[in-house]
Image (cartoon, rainbow, N blue to C red):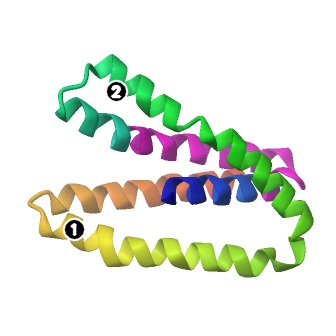
Amino acid sequence: MIPNINYLMISITFNLYLTPVIQNGIALAIAIGLQNIPEGMDVSLPLVALGYNPKKAVIIATLTGLVEPVGALFGLVAVSLFQPILPVAMGFAAGAMLFVISEEIIPETQAKCKARYATFAVIAGFIVMMLLDNMMK
């Protein structure tokens, strides 16, 4: 259920950025594509650990992403119908994502022995997002 909500928020954001300037949409599409790589690994690596063939695990992970276009269409309709409340909804979504990161992900990475790698990954992700943000200007 949570990944489906994620796809909906991505599609709403993509449609908002795509409308005024095509370059904003392109930079956002690159960011979404980069984010989808670890999401696919979240699905496929546990399947491989359970004994699935790696090719079959990749196919299953790809199939789980097929819901994204449906979410994009739903997001497009939602943007056009509910545009006045969109800033509040986007603020709520951003707050929810920050809460999950600060409550679950950061403490978990710091509790493991690879805390330094996790910290460098967060910094690298921040740098990539800053570069993409500057591309949109």
For the magenta stretch, what is the residue range? 16-40
Q: Is residue 65 left or right of residue 17?
A: left
User: Which residue does the numbered mark 2 point to in the structure image?
Assistant: 57
Q: Is residue 82 magenta?
A: no
**Element type at mark 1:** helix
Mark 1 sits on what residue?
108
Decide: is 99 above or below 9.
Answer: below
> In this orientation, which residue lies closer to the viewer: 121 or 61?
61
Q: Secondary structure at mark 2?
A: helix
Give the overall secondary structure of the magenta segment.
helix
Q: Residue at x 71, y 43 (%)?
A: 70
Q: Which residue lies at the image location 66% right of the left edge and 79% below the top edge?
A: 91
Q: Amino acid at mark 1?
A: Glu
Q: Percent x, y for residue 82?
A: 87, 71
The C terminus lies in quadrant: bottom right
State the image quarter where residue 56 is shown.
top left
The disc at residue 131 is none
- Labelled pair 1, 2 in contact (Cβ < 8 Å): no
